[in-house]
Image (cartoon, rainbow, N blue to C red):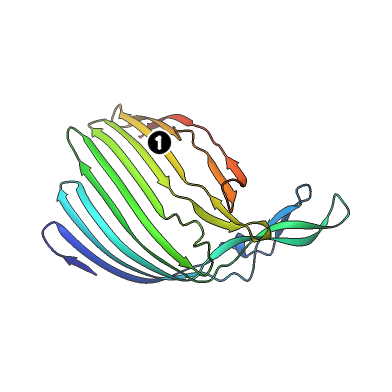
Amino acid sequence: MIYQAGEDVVLRASAAKVLARQRYSDLAGSLSLDDNQLSGSGGNPALKPYEATNYGLSAEWYFAPASFLAAEFFYRDISNYTVNQVNNETQFNVLLARDATYAVSRPVNGGTAQVTGFSLSGNTNLIWGFGFQGSYTFADAEASLATGLPYLSRHTLQLSPYYENGPFQARVSYNRRSKYFYRFGRQSSQDYTDAYRQLDAQISYQLTEGVSITAQASNLLDETYYQYSSTPNAPTSVYKNGRVFSLNATFRM
């Protein structure tokens, strides 16, 4: 439902019941084992689909050309979701020629959850081609699992100053999300991904109507994905991809 509250103000209300099927790889009965590490991963044919009823209220203020400020309050009533769980299973080890105990990760039905939160977003043209875009989302979950909803950060922030004038465009993007739970590890440990931030930049120039050059830089802060079990003092995985730079040329006929 949409209501024009004023010349520059729009109010919206929405409600929807959604369903999403599981990935075929998660539903498959296949099993992949590492005989050296005594670990593995597999699917779960008993998975139920994702189901939720979503509600939202939002207000949008278009205070200048190509500029707006929006706020939304949302509520998600989730009747089923999926979480990964690591359990000990007895499987045949080809290297040892006998049965062995493997730590096998499989998706399982997680139960119910309720997510309440709000988001703020906006964009404004400042002066001489400079502008600013940003958003912030707060989400609080109550789930049948005490850990909360998998892959849901409580705080998510995105900031993007930019410059657009004629053939030249430049943008810097800063993204940050707080820690989130992502699976149950061995012996029912609670595994988390720590807070992560990333700074990217892009510059492009339109040489002619059909030719443009773009330079991109990713992860300028050289950040690291850090995952841990229950406490940050017990790391489980560390991923460091480094900074990535690229230069592209586009030709249009």
* Residue found 22% across the figure and 32% down from its top: 165
In this picture, residue 49 sits left or right of residue 27? left
Nearest to the observer: residue 9 or residue 21: 9
Q: Quadrant of residue 32?
A: bottom right
* Residue found 75% across the figure and 48% down from its top: 37
Residue 161 vertical position relative to residue 34 in the rendered view, above or below: above
In percent of width and height, residue 215 lies at 39, 29
Residue 22 seen by the camera: no
Residue 196 vertical position relative to residue 17 in the rendered view, above or below: above
User: Label 1: few (<14), some or many (≥20) within 10 Å?
Assistant: some
Residue 27 vertical position relative to residue 203 in the rendered view, above or below: below
Numbered disc total = 1
* Residue that carries the numbered disc 1 in the rendered image: 200
In percent of width and height, residue 132 lies at 26, 41
In this picture, residue 226 sits left or right of residue 34? left
In percent of width and height, residue 2 lies at 21, 67
Quadrant location of the N terminus in the rendered image: bottom left
In percent of width and height, residue 202 lies at 37, 33
Residue 222 vertical position relative to residue 178 in the rendered view, above or below: above
Quadrant location of the C terminus in the rendered image: top left
Give, as a three-letter code, the residue at label 1: Asp
* Residue found 26% across the figure and 62% down from its top: 58
Question: Of all residues shown, which one is farthest toward the right?
Answer: 97
Question: Of all residues shown, which one is farthest toward the top?
Answer: 207
In this picture, residue 211 sits left or right of residue 36? left
- Numbered disc 1: secondary structure: strand
Q: In which quarter of the image is residue 47?
A: bottom right
Residue 2 seen by the camera: yes
Nearest to the observer: residue 181 or residue 77: 181
